[in-house]
């Protein structure tokens, strides 16, 4: 009750302050008049009675202020007074205010933008029920640098009933791609096979229909599918009656049993499936050949830790490995099971780059704060006469510090408002870039923002936690740049302060050292960011210069998948050969096309081991006798189209037809690793297109240069190529080399495929240059952002250097005049200022270089072809910062050299 009455009183005092002040004045006047009347009645004159009454009262203004200080809400009233005064001061010094707000706005905006990405991708709980209990279970072979690999499906089925660490164990596989026909043009759709408990495990309930039943995910179960919300809206016009209807996938009817909610996001950063099909698992948990694999997601029991689950899964899979058939004996060797939180699994590759960006932008914010702190210190010195007078008139030290901090808070708040606007703009651009677009050629800005962190980029947003972070950042910046000037300007030695101003004495040694210390911090942080940017730029250049094994210029690519259809059933090999022959012939006949080819795997696409080979003909594969590698089917002109050099032997030709002895071309790594470089004419036995029990002899007729797959900086792996006519592939990638801009041939490519078979959709149409750009997207974005932060740091540091020495020259103008009178040359004044600037700049460069030597190890994993202590990067960064800082100090030095002696004397 007392609190409520006090709140009401405070609110009344704040909202009705003029009326209450008038009432107080009336009361004070009435009291003085009453005392005066009493003394007049005692025999005093009117004038004497009023004088003594006023003297005994102690001063009306002091009493008025004492009464105000005891009112409810006085602190808020004083804060509002300080805000009004601070606003007037900033309006009076618009140049300073604008500089400080823009500086802080850029720092806070950049920091908030990066934090929103860090929070959305690394800290915010996943959009699933009790997501903290969800874990990923994957397989790794450290010896082969193979991480986050799926597990054998039969092992997953066994784990569902034989492990105790988990409440549920589910899984999915991503090998499903199909052609959806009917309801308009055929479209290519991506799908995933999931276990029956997959959606209940995540806490997802379909918005229409139901999820899969246990009997539907068993091999041979009914043909049923679930639709994503996006496919339901785009292909089925959001028809609420779609449940129970049939969809034609690869020529086979599938019954739609449900539609997933719009907010559902698939727990794999590489794909967002259009539909979901049953896993097709076997009840028997015995592992046999052939087998298929699935990615595993499980829900931990509340009392079980990650470490306990890891230990159980390692022991469980070691026991399972001992039951594998003989031809799989090598799989358990060196296998390690990894159990980790699902969120960490999804953001594993993005975690370190995001944290590095956050550290970099925090350095920029710190530079901005030190810059504004220097400006505030300079203003505190110029306002020391005003501060001394306010202290002489009775203002306490706390009152003066509070006034300065309120002014700093107002600056920070304005900077935070500008920073939030920048952050909202940035996240809006990311959302627009990640939104589905009908354009087949997205803009460069769209690709730059969308690709680096995959589909999860669209989850970045400004929410309550990010706003709270910005508010905290505002308070932190207020303390960082406002506290030191506030304390410095509120000293109680009023006599010295007034004498200092009266005698034109410049700021003291302590203040100068403090400002120079801030300057050293600015320059040092700028050097750290410049060195980091230099290392990343050199790494990016090295990646682009690295031998990729192909020529991406003037090359257009696309893809199609030959799936079963209702009329003809599965595609026989002869029909596949006919399709590829017709398509290549029609593509080569297009005007402006130099050559065309078809392959099952394009450069830069990730490899997948699809065959095993032996160099001796054996009836059974014993451990250690076979090698697993990628075998790619290509048409004769493939190497000519992609620009891969044939080092020895010959390319494929039209004589390498089906029914003839199998020939093959291997890459340089295959030849060196397996045959000591002498591979031409040698023979090996492969199960490509067959099985482990039936291997085909293949004769090596050529050796080609290594082609990069997955990443430009990755190490090449052994790869074999076979003629498409001898080993046809249903997954076909088209490549067309053109005489002009390949993007102009996109429609012609699509129409040509349609003329060969109108039911085959064409997707993933890109130039090879686009694919190279995609492969370097994250590295490019991180390089550009840190380079921008470094550039901003250099500019802010230069502004800081200029501000410190421009203020110093202004304060020492009288001293400069005296030096000129005593015979100093103008060149000497120039050297004096520059030499004084050299010391903090040099110290800042040394400190920055030392810090960079320590911190550069943190970005070592992002470097390629350059060491964290690269001398060129360090030398260029130090030279650039030193030159820019010295040029910034030279401007006030020139002003000092141009001091007009006559005007200085007149001003005195």
Image (cartoon, rainbow, N blue to C red):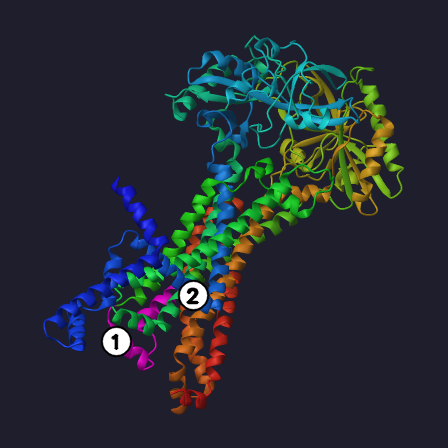
Q: Is 309 or 608 nearer to us in this picture?
A: 309
In the image, residue 561 lies at what x, y percent? 75, 26
The numbered mark, 1 or 2, whose residue comes first in the sequence reads: 2
Identified at 48% across, 51% down, the residue is: 360
* Mark 2 surroundings within 10 Å by alpha-carbon count, few (fewer than 14), some (14 through 19), many (20 or more): few
In the image, residue 771 lies at what x, y percent? 69, 41
Instruction: Report which residue position mark 1 lands on.
Output: 496
Toward the front, the furthest residue is 41
Q: Magenta span covers which residues?
A: 492-520
Secondary structure predominantly adopted by residues drawn in magenta: helix
Residue 442 visible in rendering: yes
In the image, residue 458 lies at what x, y percent? 58, 38
Instruction: Work out whether 819 lies above or below 20.
Output: below
Given contact means CB atoms under 8 Å apart, are the residues at marks 1 and 2 in contact?
A: no
476 within the magenta span: no
How much space separates mark 1 and mark 2, taking CA atoms?
Answer: 28 Å
User: From the image, which quarter does the N terminus lie in?
Assistant: top left
* Mark 1 surroundings within 10 Å by alpha-carbon count, few (fewer than 14), some (14 through 19), many (20 or more): few
Toward the left, the furthest residue is 42
User: From the image, which quarter does the C terminus lie in?
Assistant: bottom left
Instruction: Work out whether 320 lies above or below 234.
Output: above
Q: Is 186 or 486 nearer to us in this picture?
A: 486
Instruction: Work out whether 207 lies above or below 650.
Output: above
Q: Secondary structure at mark 2?
A: helix
Identified at 29% across, 59% down, the residue is: 23
In the image, residue 432 lies at what x, y percent? 63, 42
Identified at 47% across, 73% down, the residue is: 889
């Amino acid at each position: 009750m007392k609190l409520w009455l006090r709140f009401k009183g405070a609110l009344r005092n704040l909202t009705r302050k003029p009326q209450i002040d008038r009432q107080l004045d009336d009361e004070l006047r009435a009291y003085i008049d009453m005392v005066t009347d009493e003394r007049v009645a005692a025999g005093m004159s009117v004038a004497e009675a009023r004088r003594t009454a006023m003297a005994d009262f102690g001063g009306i203004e002091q009493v008025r202020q004492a009464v105000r200080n005891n009112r409810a809400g006085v602190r808020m009233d004083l804060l509002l007074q300080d805000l009004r005064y601070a606003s007037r001061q900033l309006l009076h010094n618009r140049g300073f205010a604008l500089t400080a707000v823009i500086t802080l706005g850029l720092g806070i905006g950049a920091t908030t933008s990066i934090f929103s990405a860090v929070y959305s991708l690394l800290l915010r709980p996943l959009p699933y029920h009790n997501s903290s209990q969800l874990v990923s279970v994957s397989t790794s072979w450290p010896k082969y640098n193979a991480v986050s690999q799926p597990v054998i499906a039969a092992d997953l089925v066994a784990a569902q009933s034989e492990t105790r660490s988990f409440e549920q164990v589910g899984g999915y596989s991503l090998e499903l791609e199909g052609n959806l026909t009917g309801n308009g043009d055929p479209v290519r759709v991506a799908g995933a096979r999931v276990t029956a408990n997959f959606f209940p495990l995540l806490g997802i309930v379909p918005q229409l229909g139901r999820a899969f039943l246990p009997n539907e995910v068993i091999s041979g179960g009914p043909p049923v599918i679930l639709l994503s919300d996006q496919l339901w809206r785009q292909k089925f016009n959001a028809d609420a009656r779609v449940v129970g209807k049939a969809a034609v996938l690869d020529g086979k009817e599938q019954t739609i049993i449900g539609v997933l909610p719009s907010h559902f996001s698939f727990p794999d950063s590489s794909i967002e499936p259009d539909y979901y099909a049953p896993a097709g698992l076997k009840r028997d948990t015995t592992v046999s050949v052939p087998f298929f694999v699935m990615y595993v997601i499980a829900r931990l029991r509340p009392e079980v830790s990650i470490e306990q689950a890891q230990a159980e899964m390692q022991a469980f899979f070691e026991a399972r490995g001992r039951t594998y058939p003989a031809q799989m004996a090598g799989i358990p060797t060196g296998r390690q099971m990894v159990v980790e939180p699902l969120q960490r699994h999804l953001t594993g590759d993005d975690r370190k780059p995001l944290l590095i960006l956050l550290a970099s932008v925090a350095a920029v914010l710190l530079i901005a704060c030190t810059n504004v702190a220097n400006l505030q210190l300079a203003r505190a010195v110029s306002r020391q006469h005003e501060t001394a007078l306010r202290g002489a008139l009775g203002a306490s030290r706390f009152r003066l510090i509070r006034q300065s901090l309120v002014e700093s808070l107002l600056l920070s708040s304005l900077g935070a408002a500008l920073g939030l606007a920048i952050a909202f703009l940035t996240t809006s651009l990311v959302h627009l870039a990640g939104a589905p677009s009908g354009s087949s050629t997205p803009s460069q800005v769209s690709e730059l923002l969308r690709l680096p962190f995959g589909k999860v980029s669209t989850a970045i947003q400004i929410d309550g936690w990010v706003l709270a972070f910005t508010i905290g950042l505002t308070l932190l910046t207020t303390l960082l740049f406002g506290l030191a000037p506030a304390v410095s300007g509120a000293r109680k030695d009023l006599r010295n302060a007034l004498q200092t101003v009266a005698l034109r004495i410049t700021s003291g040694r302590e203040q100068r050292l403090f400002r120079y210390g801030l300057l050293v911090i600015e320059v040092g942080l700028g050097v750290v960011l410049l060195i980091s940017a230099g290392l990343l730029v050199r790494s990016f250049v090295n990646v682009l210069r690295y031998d990729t094994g192909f020529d991406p210029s003037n090359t257009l690519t696309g893809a199609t998948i030959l799936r079963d259809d209702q009329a003809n059933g599965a595609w026989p090999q002869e029909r596949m050969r006919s399709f590829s022959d017709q398509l290549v012939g029609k593509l080569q006949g297009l005007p402006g096309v130099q050559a065309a080819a078809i392959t099952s795997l394009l450069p830069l696409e990730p490899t997948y081991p699809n065959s095993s080979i032996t160099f001796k003909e054996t009836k059974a594969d014993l451990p250690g006798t076979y090698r697993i590698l990628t075998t790619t089917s290509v048409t004769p002109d493939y190497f000519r189209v992609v620009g891969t050099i044939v080092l020895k032997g010959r390319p494929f030709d039209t004589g390498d037809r089906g029914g003839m002895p199998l020939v093959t071309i291997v890459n340089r790594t295959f030849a060196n690793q397996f045959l000591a470089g002498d591979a031409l004419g040698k023979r090996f036995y492969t199960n490509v297109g067959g099985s482990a029990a039936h291997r085909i002899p293949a004769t090596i007729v050529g050796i080609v240069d290594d082609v990069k797959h997955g990443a430009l900086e990755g190490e090449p792996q052994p790869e074999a190529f076979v003629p498409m006519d001898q080993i046809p592939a249903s997954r076909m990638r088209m490549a067309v080399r053109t005489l002009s801009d390949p993007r102009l041939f996109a429609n012609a490519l699509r129409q040509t495929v349609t003329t060969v078979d109108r039911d085959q959709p064409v997707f993933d149409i890109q130039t090879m240059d686009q694919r190279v750009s995609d492969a370097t997207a994250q590295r490019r974005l991180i390089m550009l952002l840190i380079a921008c932060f470094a550039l901003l740091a250099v500019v802010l540091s230069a502004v800081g250097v200029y501000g410190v020495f421009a203020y110093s020259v202004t304060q020492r103008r009288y001293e400069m005049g005296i030096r000129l009178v005593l015979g100093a040359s103008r060149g000497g004044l120039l050297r004096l200022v520059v030499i004084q600037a050299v010391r903090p700049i040099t110290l800042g460069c040394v400190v920055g270089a030392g810090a960079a030597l320590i911190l550069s190890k943190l970005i070592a994993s992002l470097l390629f072809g350059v060491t964290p202590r690269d001398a060129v990067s360090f030398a260029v960064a130090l030279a650039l910062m030193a030159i820019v800082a010295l040029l910034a100090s030279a401007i006030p030095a020139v002003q000092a050299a141009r001091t007009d002696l006559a005007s200085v004397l007149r001003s005195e």
